[in-house]
Image: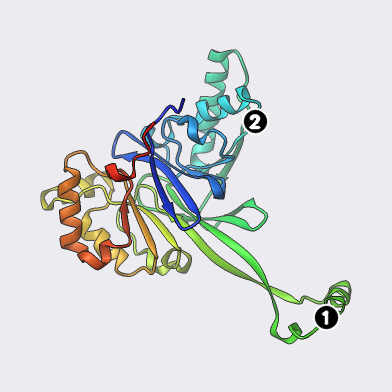
């Protein structure tokens, strides 16, 4: 039986499973890409995913790290890979060591410290690019990018055998093309992410917008979160086909959030926006 009642959003050929409520828990998994953004309390549904991409160390995003790694061992899977800001790796090792002593079994893990600008391969044709966010010390976001090789125009009329011969001589006959599939911002204050082309052109943007009411703008600033006015400005500069909003406050009802979104962004703009925790996206057990 699944441990969580997760939202389930389907975008084209991709599934997005997750749960994200401000201050409670955030975990967003994309099985086809083999990545889980943040780990929340490690719902059973994401244990089989091989890569956790942790944005920062706050409890509601990181509490499930030890359980995720330990349960993979328990179920006979290889050690999970956790990408996390470099400044957190030492702390995560201490947590795993302490839990290992409590449990009586070592918790195997592949921990990878990352910083803005780093890349990490998750599949032969998929890699993760790391960028800075503005939330806590060292916090980062991630873009999953597909890389394909395209034949150079001057070689398109050659036969397969001729291409093989050129490659055998050390001639570079192709060049890489990059297609940003999904960007996950994690918790962050407003940053003009349109300056990063791979974010601006990601097919899917998963972004926090925590606060919606005018009187909550101060709360957004204090917690280094995004307010709807900042979110509206940001998405207006981006070219994403689909946007999933996470990390909603519980201070505002879902009906009121929908109303404010329509008012701020307009009916057409709302057409490409999904609220992750909208009851219509909940996958019932």
Residue 282 vs 168, above or below: the answer is above
Nearer-N-terminus badge (1/2): 2
Could you classify mark 1 by the number of other residues whose Cα lies within 10 Å: few (under 14), some (14-19), or many (20 or more)?
few
Residue 60 vs 209, above or below: the answer is above
- The answer to which image quadrant residue 282 occupies is top left
- Name the spot of residue 59 as percent of width and height, x first: 38, 32
User: Residue at point 28% right, 45% down?
Assistant: 278
Question: Residue 231: which numbered mark, if any?
Answer: none
Residue carrying label 1: 159
User: Residue at point 25% right, 67% down?
Assistant: 268
User: Position of 155 compared to 148: left or right?
Assistant: right
Residue 266 vs 172, above or below: the answer is above
Q: Nearer the viewer, mark 1 or mark 2?
A: 1
Q: 65 or 284: nearer the eye?
A: 284
User: Residue at point 34% right, 64% down?
Assistant: 192
* Callout 2 secondary element: loop
* Callout 1 secondary element: loop
Residue carrying label 2: 77
User: Residue at point 55% right, 50% down?
Assistant: 33
């Amino acid at each position: 039986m699944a441990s969580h009642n997760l939202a389930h959003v389907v975008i084209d050929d991709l599934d997005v499973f997750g749960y994200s409520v401000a201050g409670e828990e955030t975990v967003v998994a994309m099985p086809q890409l083999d990545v889980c953004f943040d780990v929340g309390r490690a719902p059973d549904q994401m244990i089989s995913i091989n890569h956790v991409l942790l944005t920062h160390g706050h409890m509601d995003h990181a509490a499930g790290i030890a359980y995720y790694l330990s349960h993979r061992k328990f179920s006979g899977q290889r050690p999970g890979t956790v990408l996390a800001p470099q400044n957190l790796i030492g702390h995560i090792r201490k947590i795993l060591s302490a839990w290992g002593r409590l449990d009586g079994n070592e918790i195997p893990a592949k921990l990878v410290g990352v910083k803005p600008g780093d890349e990490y391969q998750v599949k032969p044709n998929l890699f993760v690019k790391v960028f800075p966010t503005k939330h806590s010390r060292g916090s980062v976001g991630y873009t999953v990018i597909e890389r394909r090789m395209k034949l150079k125009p001057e070689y398109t009329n050659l036969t397969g055998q001729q291409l093989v011969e050129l490659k055998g001589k050390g001639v570079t006959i192709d060049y890489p093309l990059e297609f940003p599939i999904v960007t996950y911002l994690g918790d962050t204050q407003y940053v003009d992410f349109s300056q990063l082309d791979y974010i601006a052109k990601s097919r899917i943007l998963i972004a926090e917008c925590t606060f919606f009411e005018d009187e909550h703008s101060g709360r957004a600033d204090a917690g280094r979160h995004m307010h709807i006015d900042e979110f509206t400005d940001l998405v207006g500069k981006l070219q994403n086909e689909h946007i999933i909003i996470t990390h909603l406050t519980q201070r505002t009802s879902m009906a009121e959030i929908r109303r404010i979104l329509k008012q701020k962004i307009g009916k057409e703009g709302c057409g490409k926006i999904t609220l992750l925790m909208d009851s219509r996206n909940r996958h019932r057990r």
